[in-house]
Amino acid sequence: MDQRLHFITFATPDLDRARAFYKDGLGWEPIMDVPGEIIFFQVAPGQVLGLFDAGKFDQDLGSGTRSGGVSGVTLSHNVSSEDEVSSTIDQLKAAGASVLKPAQPGEFGGIFHGHVKDPNGIVWEIAYNPGWRIDDDGSVVFG
Amino acid sequence: MDQRLHFITFATPDLDRARAFYKDGLGWEPIMDVPGEIIFFQVAPGQVLGLFDAGKFDQDLGSGTRSGGVSGVTLSHNVSSEDEVSSTIDQLKAAGASVLKPAQPGEFGGIFHGHVKDPNGIVWEIAYNPGWRIDDDGSVVFG
């Protein structure tokens, strides 16, 4: 199995609030939007974030269990400075996110960051990490 | 905020089992491995999957709550044929995953797929989707 992730899909109790948050609030452009079912946003080369109606998410998985909300995962968006961490968190808050951790030095990895939760419980970390970069070929480099 | 995801990080109760599964079982190459803390794998251009010790994940988030396991999210890996869905699920099973849904036609999106759970509760969907492709510039195209 190649070391490759193509879709990240979240159980989404309120798809209309997801659309309002990502599309109207943050200005993201969906590559597909099926009301009542799923909204897809491209979030990396060759990769899509899917916000999938929670009932249909459970049905698709077919394990007979209900997902019971999102937990145990964070998504991180890196920015270019400490100030941009703060301004991006402000932008997310204005779009409807709740702030879990205001911008501050992180405990791990020498970063400056903060966390917010989107209207469906997805946690985003906004981080400035001076020891991280993406090379021209897409390789991630630490240190 | 750019439409861009740089890290996906999971609360990982057993980092040694995660290493055994992804590195030894699937042959993935970590870009960083800090025993007892975190293992990073690059999974898309400019993007990293982080398996973060569950206690430190909670500490980093600092919200005073325990994550209580992973739920409400699936990761999908697309392959080129129905047969490859089955063989990839077999490979994951051999590496230590449990099968949640054997390879079969999906209920949504005209795909053929199955689901497995890794040793730390992360659900992977393995899918063949004839109506999906990645263009040379990294754009994802449906239909």
Image: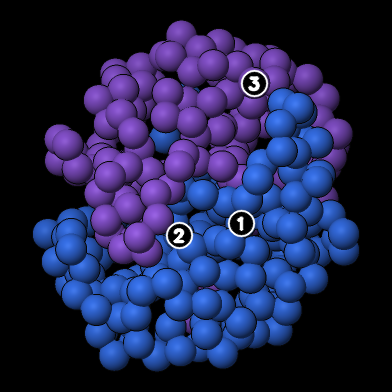
Chain colours: A blue, B purple
Answer whether residue A15 is visible to the viewer in this image: yes
Q: Position of residue B6 (x, y in %)?
A: 40, 61
Closest to the camera, between mark 2 and mark 1, is 2
Quadrant assignment, res B11: top left
The front one of B65 and A132 is B65
In terms of secondary structure, where does tag 1 sit? strand
Which residue was labeled with disc 3?
B100
Query: Which kind of residue does numbered mark 1 sit on?
Result: Leu
Residue at 70 percent of width and 20 percent of height: B101
Quadrant assignment, res B21: top left
Chain for disc number 2: A
Residue at 87 percent of width and 63 percent of height: A35
Which residue was labeled with disc 1?
A49
* Residue A54 versus residue A67 in the image, above or below: below
Chain for disc number 1: A
Query: Which kind of residue does numbered mark 2 sit on?
Result: Leu
Query: Which kind of residue does numbered mark 3 sit on?
Result: Leu
Answer whether residue B27 is visible to the viewer in this image: no
Same chain for the residues at labels 2 and 1, yes or no?
Answer: yes
Chain for disc number 3: B
Q: Position of residue B23 (x, y in %)?
A: 30, 25
In terms of secondary structure, where does tag 3 sit? strand
Residue at 81 percent of width and 36 percent of height: A59
Which residue was labeled with disc 2?
A75
